[in-house]
Image (tube, rainbow, N blue to C red):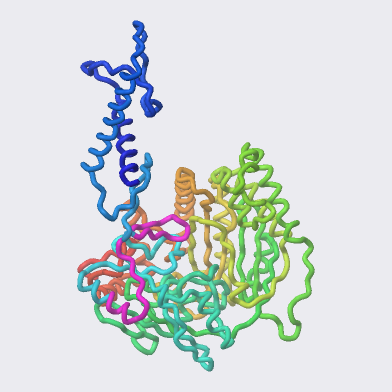
């Protein structure tokens, strides 16, 4: 069978060779022969003079001769270019790329916006294996960048030279029910941790939007939830165990080397591989989530009350509308119990306007027939709101008028989705972020809880004005959340003032298609959107991007300006000094860290 397959390869080769145009010196081709391979070789018949009909024996000999020639050519090709003994013979296909080597790993972030290929991807199963791995690679000066679940929009953990992932180090090591503390391996995912400690009546103080992050990663990038009285997640860290290239395994806390502890809590994976984390937890509790729609005028009147009276609160602003979706979460009252509320609309009724817009848009873009004939197309009535939004955006993601219609449909959906929901905090505090996307999120000071500056609302008003002025096809939502300050010096919410609060605002553009050209166009439009926001708002409001969402500029001057800007906000010299002491060969670094925090001899 292998010879037969190789023969087909030689035939394809011959086919390409024989279809080349003949040069003037080429002798005239032989007369066409009606043989089994005739369809592969279309030739022009000669008809200048009648040709005598050949005899049966002569015709038979010609068949035998050409068949022998083809077999001989195939055999010669096969033995001239032999396959290795362990080759997997497959039918040749035109215009196919060669398969990647088996030891080459392709690693991308969740949104598919950043991707690397590497031959060095390590997953140690325990701290001893991790220590050995770090030591050996440090001796070889070979990079092994720590990478978590790959959920960061900017791919901060990716490195082509090599990566180490702690997904197999995912155990709950110790639970102190009295102190409400838990010690875990850093590769454990948030949901696994929560499930592992709920039998002790404990949970995390706050959550980000999703539950798939590894604890080491969510801490190192300074991730956050929402609630003006609650700090970012790094503040829950009581102590950490770092495996460093230069000093081996060290344990740090506010009692043991506090300066390094507060620097390394949001260490961006550059000071050591976080192997173990001890977290301060809280009692597990049920929350009541209240979702309602408001407008900016009413929000301004009630903003201070909303921030101070709710344990968790966030706003979802919808561009090209005055709608503001408010989501609050609070513990269930021991005396009142959960609220008794009957929603005005069912889920189907709330979604119907969005479904109607999708059907209408299919007709507008003249693809309804193709969709109806596609067996793989899901039933529109089975799609969630975010799935419907992705499908709507995919039709024309960069049309401002189309996006405005979608945003207005979203505002109506939320107006019909007002109501209450009861559940445990790890169930309630999540958020369906939608499909793949580009995100830029900034953090900036918003006064204190006792005296909010209202700069957070002013920021949103200026942002929406900018969107409308520049006619940016900005989808919904613009998500706005709040946290208390962090004592971690590299946190965007870092502050020495205990009562400071910070607002976090995220802008977004979805990538609802796999079409490379369309994704490229969306990417270009998003970065235009981001540049306008940066120019108009960042310096004015002292806004700095989330470490998992900052993007490295390609332009040298823009990069230099970003480096200088980071120096004004963060202790870059102290961070680089710690990098040189703990990782002198930079094996934990990657291109992003080298660009944002360039090391020099004076650091």
Q: Is residue 104 visible?
A: yes
Displayed quadrant of residue 456 = bottom right
User: Which one is in front, 349 or 98?
Assistant: 98
Q: Quadrant of the C terminus?
A: bottom left
User: Which one is in front, 242 or 300?
Assistant: 242
Q: How many marks?
A: 0
Residue 442, percent from left and from top: 48, 63
Which residue is at a point 75% across and 56% down the rendered structure image? 349
Residue 535, percent from left and from top: 45, 53
Which residue is at a point 67% across and 56% down the rendered structure image? 382
As for residue 121 lying within the magenta part, the answer is yes
Displayed quadrant of residue 360 = top right
Please give the range of residues in magenta. Answer: 105-133
In the displayed structure, 92 sits above or below 527; it is: above
Residue 602, percent from left and from top: 21, 69
On screen, residue 169 versus residue 380, left or right, reads: left
As for residue 467 lying within the magenta part, the answer is no
In the displayed structure, 527 sits above or below 134; it is: above
On screen, residue 201 versus residue 55, left or right, reads: right
User: Which one is in front, 284 or 478?
Assistant: 284
Task: Residue at the far front: name it.
Answer: 57
Q: Is residue 595 visible?
A: no
On screen, residue 561 versus residue 461, left or right, reads: left
Which residue is at a point 58% across and 69% down the rendered structure image? 430
In the displayed structure, 295 sits above or below 175; it is: above
Task: Residue at the far bottom: name it.
Answer: 178
Residue 11, percent from left and from top: 32, 34
């Amino acid at each position: 069978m292998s010879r037969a397959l190789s023969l087909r390869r030689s035939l394809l080769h011959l086919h390409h060779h024989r279809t080349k145009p003949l040069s003037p010196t080429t002798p005239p081709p032989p007369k066409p022969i009606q043989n089994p391979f005739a369809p592969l070789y279309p030739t022009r018949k000669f008809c200048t003079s009648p040709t005598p009909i050949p005899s049966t024996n002569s015709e038979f000999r010609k068949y035998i001769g050409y068949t022998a020639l083809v077999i001989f050519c195939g055999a010669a090709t096969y033995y001239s270019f032999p396959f290795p003994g362990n080759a997997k013979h497959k039918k040749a296909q035109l215009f196919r790329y060669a398969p990647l080597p088996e030891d080459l790993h392709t690693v991308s972030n969740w949104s598919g916006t950043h991707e690397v290929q590497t031959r060095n991807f390590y997953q140690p199963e325990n701290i001893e294996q991790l220590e050995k791995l770090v030591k050996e690679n440090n001796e070889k000066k070979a990079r092994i960048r720590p990478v978590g679940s790959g959920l960061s929009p900017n791919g901060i953990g990716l490195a082509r030279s090599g990566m180490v992932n702690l997904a197999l180090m995912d155990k709950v090591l110790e639970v102190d029910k009295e102190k409400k503390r838990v010690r875990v391996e850093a590769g454990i995912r948030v949901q696994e941790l929560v499930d592992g400690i709920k039998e002790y009546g404990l949970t995390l103080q706050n959550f980000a939007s999703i539950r798939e992050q590894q604890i080491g990663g969510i801490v190192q990038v300074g991730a956050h939830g929402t609630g003006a009285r609650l700090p970012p997640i790094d503040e829950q860290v009581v102590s950490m165990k770092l495996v460093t290239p230069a000093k081996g395994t060290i344990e740090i806390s506010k009692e043991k080397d506090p300066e390094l502890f507060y620097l390394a809590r949001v260490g961006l994976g550059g000071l050591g591989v976080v192997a173990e984390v001890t977290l301060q937890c809280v009692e597990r509790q049920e929350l009541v989530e209240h979702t309602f729609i408001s407008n900016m005028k009413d929000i301004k009147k009630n903003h201070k009350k909303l921030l101070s009276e709710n344990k968790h609160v966030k706003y979802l602003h919808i561009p090209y509308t005055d709608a503001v979706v408010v989501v609050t979460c609070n513990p269930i009252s021991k005396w009142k119990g959960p609220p008794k509320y009957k929603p005005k609309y069912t889920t189907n009724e709330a979604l119907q306007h969005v479904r109607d817009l999708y059907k209408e848009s299919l007709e507008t873009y003249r693809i309804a027939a193709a969709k109806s004939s596609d067996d793989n197309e899901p039933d529109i009535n089975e799609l969630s709101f975010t799935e419907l939004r992705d499908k709507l955006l995919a039709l024309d993601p960069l049309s401002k008028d189309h996006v405005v219609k979608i945003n207005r449909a979203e505002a109506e959906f939320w107006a019909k989705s007002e109501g209450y929901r009861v559940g445990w905090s790890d169930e309630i505090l999540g958020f369906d972020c939608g499909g793949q996307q580009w995100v830029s999120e900034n953090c900036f000071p918003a006064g204190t809880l006792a005296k909010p500056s209202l700069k957070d609302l002013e920021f949103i008003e200026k942002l929406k004005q900018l969107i409308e002025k520049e006619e940016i096809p900005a989808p919904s939502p613009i998500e706005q959340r709040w946290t208390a300050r962090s004592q971690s010096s590299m946190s965007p919410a870092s502050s020495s003032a205990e009562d400071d609060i910070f607002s976090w605002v995220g802008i977004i553009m979805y990538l609802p298609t796999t079409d490379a050209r369309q994704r490229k166009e969306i990417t270009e439009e998003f970065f235009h959107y981001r540049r306008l926001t940066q120019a108009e708002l960042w310096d004015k409001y002292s806004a700095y991007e989330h470490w998992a969402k900052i993007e490295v500029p390609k332009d040298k001057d823009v990069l230099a300006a970003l480096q200088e800007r980071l120096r004004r906000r963060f202790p870059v010299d102290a961070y680089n000094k710690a990098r040189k002491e703990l990782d002198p060969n930079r094996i934990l670094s990657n291109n992003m860290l080298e660009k944002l925090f360039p090391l020099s001899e004076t650091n």
